[in-house]
């Protein structure tokens, strides 16, 4: 194992992003590898929350329009800060609601079924909330049987051609993940979008596991819409306000879930009963924005815009590459299945390993200060995050994993997941 430590130290010495590690609160002797579920708090995120609290303290109601960070425009302001991460114009990006609400909002708004074309194409590996939301839309439109699921050949990943083969004239809309939440596979968004548009289908992506980990070019690819959460790679904190993108060609369509914060800002306080939609993405807001759950993003996103998503991606690939190399070389005898695709263009920001005792192994790792997460039925997800993890973290996490396997301590933990895994 010693040679891996040397490699890790060499990589760390070369790491241009290592200066950001100190900006984050990282517990003592903790190897935090769960940034794809909940990113760590940075000092800048903490400071921006305190600044917003201070505006509330000193300005009261005038905080909506006064101060350096007027709350009335904060959803759009954070949208601007996220635009570069997804390759979009700032006027097409917004921080609002939760991911699930944004799926209801975008899908309901852009889904325009006809008698022959009413199906929504998803995949059988997507996160449950996405499926619940899409099924609810279909049910409400009287097309409950319209959910079409692309199947996985190996139970972990998807083949682009299998998805494209399902795109026919019966499909009205497609919602797919950009990076699969379990395996970490990146889907070919550009090719899928091209194929969907050739068939006249609206296509959107869930970027929960890709934003902040990989670059995107949504506008150039012509993607119709996207949604994402901000508490994973973007480090916005638990329940931080989600994001959405809608291509400018759809901005003229009136949103389905209407509320007064989607109204044209100039006329919003006229309190008229006729909805006067904002001309741009602002229309996708519904009610009063959750200012305190947006505030951490002001600081957290500043770090991203400074570090640059290209460098973040380069380091992230090197971290997961190093992890995969160690797993291949040192873990063969333990019976792990390494699920994450190997090619760099197909691998997101985390690695998924399968083992029949995965829940016990996950618990044993946590007891030793390594924080991954368990995903049913038998997987451990490990995310070394470019902004705050080092190569030495990866080395220590895997060294501890090896010790747990060698001494069998994982057996003491049973093999059941916690209530929140
Ligand atoms: C792919 C994906 N979609 C949706 C969600 C749910 O998002 P929210 O709880 O913000 O609605 C998550 C994670 O919680 C996710 O990983
Ligand atoms: N949103 C979460 C939560 O409220 C509690 C615990 C975990 C989460 C997650 O984000 C899970 C995550 N979407 C996943 O990929 O499994």
Image (tube, rainbow, N blue to C red):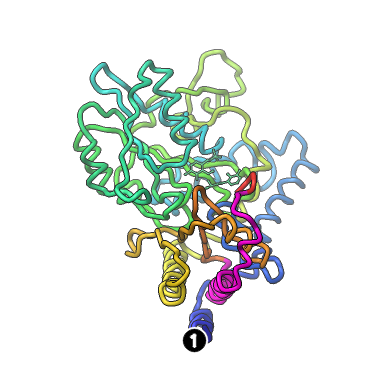
Secondary structure found at label 1: helix
Taking the spot 71% from the left edge, 46% from the top edge, the residue there is 52
Query: Residues in magenta?
Result: 388-417
Which residue occupies 48% across, 44% down?
Answer: 228
> Looking at the image, which is closer to me, 290 or 166?
166
Depicted 297 relative to depicted 407: above or below: above
20 above or below 39? below
Pick the front one: 78 or 188: 188
Q: Quadrant of residue 28?
A: bottom right
x and y percent of residue 270 in the render? Answer: 60, 19
Estimate the x, y position of residue 300 in percent, counting from the top left.
60, 56
With 211 as the anchor, is 159 left or right in this view? left
Is 407 one of the magenta-colored residues? Answer: yes
Tell me if residue 353 can be seen.
yes
Residue to which mark 1 is pinned: 3
The structure residue drawn at horizontal position 45% and vertical position 72%, both measured from the top left corner, is 333
The correct choice, above or below, for 252 with respect to 15 in the image is: above
């Amino acid at each position: 194992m010693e040679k891996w430590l040397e490699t890790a130290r060499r990589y760390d010495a070369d790491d241009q992003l290592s200066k950001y590690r100190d900006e984050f609160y990282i517990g003592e002797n903790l190897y935090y590898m769960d940034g794809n579920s909940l990113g760590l708090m940075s000092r800048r995120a903490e400071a921006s929350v305190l600044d917003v609290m201070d505006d509330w303290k000193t300005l009261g109601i005038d905080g909506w329009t006064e101060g350096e960070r007027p709350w009335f425009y904060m959803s759009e302001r954070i949208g601007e800060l996220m635009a570069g991460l997804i390759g979009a114009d700032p006027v097409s990006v917004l921080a609002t609601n939760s991911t699930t609400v944004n799926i209801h909002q975008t899908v309901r708004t852009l889904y325009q079924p006809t008698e022959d074309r009413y199906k929504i194409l998803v995949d059988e590996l997507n996160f449950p909330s996405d499926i619940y939301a899409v099924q609810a839309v279909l049910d409400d439109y009287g097309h409950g049987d319209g959910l079409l699921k692309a199947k996985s050949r190996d139970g972990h990943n998807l083949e682009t051609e299998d998805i494209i083969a399902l795109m026919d004239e019966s499909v009205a809309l497609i919602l797919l993940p950009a990076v699969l939440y379990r395996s970490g596979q990146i889907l070919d968004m550009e090719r899928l979008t091209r194929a969907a548009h050739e068939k006249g289908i609206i296509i959107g992506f869930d970027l929960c596991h890709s934003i902040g980990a990989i670059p995107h070019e949504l506008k150039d690819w012509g993607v119709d819409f996207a949604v994402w959460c901000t508490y994973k790679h973007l480090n916005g904190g638990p329940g931080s306000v989600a994001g959405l993108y809608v291509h400018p060609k759809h901005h003229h369509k009136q949103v389905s879930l209407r509320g007064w914060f989607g109204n044209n800002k100039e006329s919003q306080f006229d309190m008229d009963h006729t909805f006067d939609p904002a001309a741009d993405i602002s229309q996708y807001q519904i009610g009063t924005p959750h200012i305190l759950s947006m505030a951490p993003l002001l600081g957290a996103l500043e770090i991203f815009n400074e570090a640059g998503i290209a460098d973040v991606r380069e380091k992230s690939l090197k971290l997961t590459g190093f992890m995969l190399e160690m797993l291949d070389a040192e873990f063969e005898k333990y019976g792990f299945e390494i699920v994450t695709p190997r090619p760099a263009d197909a691998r997101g920001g985390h690695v998924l390993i399968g083992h029949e005792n995965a829940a016990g192994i996950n618990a044993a790792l946590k007891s030793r200060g390594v924080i991954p997460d368990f995903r049913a039925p038998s997987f451990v997800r490990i995310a070394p995050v470019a902004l705050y993890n080092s190569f030495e973290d990866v080395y220590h996490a895997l060294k501890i994993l090896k010790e747990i396997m060698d001494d069998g301590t994982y057996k003491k933990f049973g093999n059941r997941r916690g209530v929140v895994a």
